[in-house]
Every structure is written in C-alpha cells, then in structure tokens.
C-alpha cells in the first residue's frame, strides 16, 4: 500500500515547469507540481479507491494532490461535513468540477446541489450546478418538473451570475436537453431566447459550447453508437444461429 509521502514524491517527480505555467492559466495556484493528466492517471491506477489517502492528499494543499484525491476518493464514503470542508478549499474550476463530479456519485448529490447552487460565491455555485450537469439524466434525482424549474431559473439569472457559474449553467442546459424530448424543447426554446453564453476563459483555448448545436451533435453520436451496438448484437445472434 502506498503511503501519502510515496504518492507525493511520485507527483513531485512527475511535475514540470511547463505544466505549472499551463495550469496557472487555468486558475490553479501554488503549491503545484504541474503533473500531466496522463501521469495523474498512471499514478492513480494502482491506488484504486483509497479514501484515507484521498483525505491526506487533499489536506496537503497541493493542487495536483487535490486533483488526484478527487480521483481516488470513495464517493459513497463522502460525508456532507467533508464535502463542505473540501469546498472551502476550492479556488479554481478544475477542482470545482472535480469535486462536483465526485459528489454527483455520492448519496448527498441532490442535497448538496440544492444547498450550493444559489450561493453568490463563484465556486460553491459552480460545484452545485456541475452536480446537476452530472446527474440531470438520473430520474431518481430529478423529475422533469424539477428540471423545468431549473431551466427557468437559469434563463432568469445566467446573465448576472459570476463568470464560471455561467459556464456551468450553460452545461446544465445541455445536460437537461439530452435527457429526453419532454424537456428538450423547453431547453432549446430558452437557448434561443438567451443566445450564446459569454464566459471569459482567460489565456486558454477553452470555449463554452453553443447549446443547440452541442445537443444535436451529441444526440447524433448517441444514435450512431446505438446503431453500432445493435448491429454487433445482431451479428452475434446470427453467428449463434449458424453455429
């Protein structure tokens, strides 16, 4: 079993000055080693799920260690107390989306999203909305009526919310639009009234996608993949019959 010091040493050795510059442009602050996502994946793989190690990595205060913590933490073991404590440390969108993604798999996803979405602060609200993006298609968490209410709220508020919250709200509209036809029309109508979402991504190549075209492309991709799976299943069935 790897110790916290072992893993911190691996992260330190994998870091580069160039990656530190890149991550700084995305809002990551010191202390940071600058570990590529490829190397983070390599380091995370043998660790599997290790909630105790994740706690130590997060508490180190190092950006790369916190990204890794979000990969190896046990979503099912995340308490609301720990979630709130980790949230207080979030100071960039990388950690905000990482924490939101982790908590979307926890038993507290809906409760924490409801608690944080309306925060006037950028990062709590961003995490709250990103949880919606990750869970919008889960009918055990959101009813169609719940999602219609969120679409109305986004349309009313998005122009006045903090920069990164606008990006996450835009993502929520896409996620809701992908759920099913009953809510897709509501999203597309709202998107038509809103127009493009304006987000400052700083000195990065990141963009906030246009809602309707993104939904259309994703649905087309899903249909293509479904057809491919159906064809593969039919071929297997035919092979069994002829055997």
Image (tube, rainbow, N blue to C red):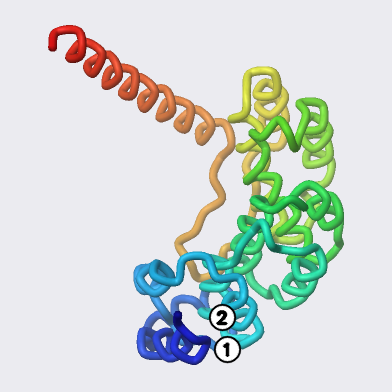
* One can see residue 200 in this view: no
**Residue 82 position (above or below residue 62):** above
* Residue drawn at (39%, 23%) of the image: 226
The residue lying toward the viewer, choosing from 58 and 212, is 58
From the viewer's perspective, is residue 84 above or below residue 3?
above
Q: Would you name the residue on which mark 1 appears? A: 30
The percent coordinates of residue 197 (x first, y second) are 65, 46
Category of crowding for the residue at label 2, using alpha-carbon neighbours closer than 10 angstroms: few (below 14), some (14–19), many (at least 20): many
Q: Compared to 85, does 100 lie above or below? A: above
Q: In this view, does 243 lie to the left or right of 9?
A: left
> Which residue is located at x 64 percent, y 71 percent?
92
Residue 181's quadrant in the figure? top right
Q: Position of residue 211 (x, y in %)?
A: 59, 36
Q: Which residue is drawn at 84% across and 33% down?
A: 149
**Quarter occupied by residue 88:** bottom right
Look at the image and tell me in which quarter the N terminus lies. bottom left
The answer to whether the residue labelled 2 contacts the one labelled 1, judged by CB atoms less than 8 Å apart, is yes
Q: Residue 203, how many percent across, how many down? A: 50, 70
Residue at which label 2 appears: 63
- In this orientation, which residue lies closer to the viewer: 225 or 29? 225
CA distance separating discs 2 and 1: 7 Å
Residue in the picture at 71% in, 63% down: 78
Mark linked to residue 67 = none
Give residue 146's quadrant in the image.
top right
Badge 1 density bin: few <14, some 14–19, many ≥20, Cα 10 Å: few
2 vs 1, front mark: 2
Q: Please, which residue is most extreme toward the top here?
A: 241
Q: Is residue 99 visible?
A: yes
User: Which percent across, then down, holds residue 44?
Assistant: 43, 70
User: Where is 19 relative to 201, above or below?
Assistant: below
């Amino acid at each position: 079993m790897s110790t916290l010091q072992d893993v911190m040493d691996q992260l330190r050795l994998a870091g580069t000055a160039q990656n530190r510059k890149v991550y700084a442009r995305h809002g990551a602050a010191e202390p940071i080693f600058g570990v590529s996502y490829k190397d983070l994946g390599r380091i995370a793989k043998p660790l599997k799920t290790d909630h105790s190690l994740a706690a130590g990595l997060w508490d180190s205060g190092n950006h790369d260690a916190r990204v890794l913590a979000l990969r190896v933490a046990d979503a099912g073991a995340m308490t609301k107390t720990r979630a709130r404590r980790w949230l207080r440390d979030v100071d960039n969108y990388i950690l905000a989306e990482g924490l939101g993604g982790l908590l979307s798999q926890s038993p507290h996803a809906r409760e924490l999203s409801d608690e944080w979405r309306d925060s006037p602060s950028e990062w709590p609200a961003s995490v709250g909305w990103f949880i919606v993006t990750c869970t919008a298609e889960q009918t055990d968490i959101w009813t169609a009526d719940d999602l219609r209410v969120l679409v109305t709220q986004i349309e009313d508020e998005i122009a006045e919310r903090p920069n990164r919250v606008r990006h996450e709200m835009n993502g929520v509209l896409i996620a809701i639009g992908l759920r099913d036809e009953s809510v897709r029309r509501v999203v597309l109508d709202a998107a038509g009234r809103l127009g493009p979402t304006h987000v400052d991504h700083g000195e990065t190549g990141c963009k906030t996608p246009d809602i309707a075209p993104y939904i259309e492309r994703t649905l087309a991709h899903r249909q293509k993949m479904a057809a491919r799976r159906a064809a593969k299943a039919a071929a297997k069935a035919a092979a069994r019959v002829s055997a």
